[in-house]
Amino acid sequence: MEIKDIIYSLFFFLIAGVLLVSALGVVFLHRIVYSAVAMILAFLSVAGIFVLLNADFVAVSQIIIYAVGITIVMIFAIMLTGTREDKELWIAKKFRSIVALGSAGLLFLTIIVSSILATFALQQPSDEVIQRLQTEGTTSTIGNALLTTYVLPFEVLSLLLLAAIIGAVVIAIKNKESKSQ
């Protein structure tokens, strides 16, 4: 085993450890704001794993979309719904661990059953795709595909996300007005 492989494995286990601890923090922290901060760390750890996999575009997208965008939307939702006190999580304290362990067990069971029942076929990319990735990189290749082949689904998705954000703001404003009356 080369020194490069040892360092790579060391970084992977370090990032995976941070991811595991922050994911547990999302579930087990008592304040929802603290859980949101732990979620930011979990998203950044996932981006770190993508960097280790040489998926630079996906890593940057992970940071921009999830670690920044989704988390800010969630924090705004927390701030818009309710009083100024820190919000307690919706799960009662005595049931939180049971729900978390049950959900994790169900997810683990689903992954195991899916892995057993699925048939995986590895497909090698064509020489043309390999050549494009080596010369242009993943960012250019994915960007080119999004703005040529997949431009219509990309634009439809952006309109759907815009509609969802506007709907969330309207619902939050209506709930706040009904609570004040």
Image (cartoon, rainbow, N blue to C red):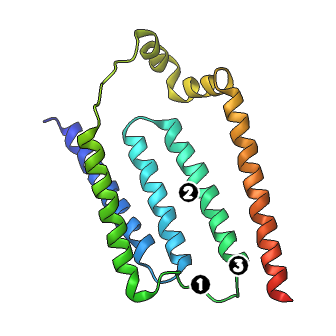
Residue drawn at point x = 74 percent, y = 57 percent: 165
Quarter of the figure that contains the C terminus: bottom right
The residue pinned by badge 1 equals 87
In the picture as drawn, the residue positioned furthest to the top comes out as 127
The residue pinned by badge 2 equals 67
Q: Amino acid at mark 3?
A: Thr
Label 1 residue SS = loop
Q: Amino acid at mark 1?
A: Lys
Residue drawn at point x = 63 percent, y = 66 percent: 74
- Residue 88 at x, y percent in the picture: 54, 85
- Residue 93 at x, y percent in the picture: 42, 87
* Pointer 3 local density, CA inside 10 Å: few below 14, some 14–19, many at least 20: some
Q: Earlier in the sequence, mark 2 or mark 1?
A: 2
Q: Amino acid at mark 2?
A: Ala
Left or right? Give the position of 122 relative to 44: left
**Which marked residue is nearer to the observer: mark 2 or mark 3?**
3
The residue pinned by badge 3 equals 81
* Pointer 1 local density, CA inside 10 Å: few below 14, some 14–19, many at least 20: some
Left or right? Give the position of 104 relative to 146: left
Residue drawn at point x = 52 percent, y = 70 percent: 37
Give the total number of marks visible in the rendering: 3
Q: Earlier in the sequence, mark 3 or mark 1?
A: 3
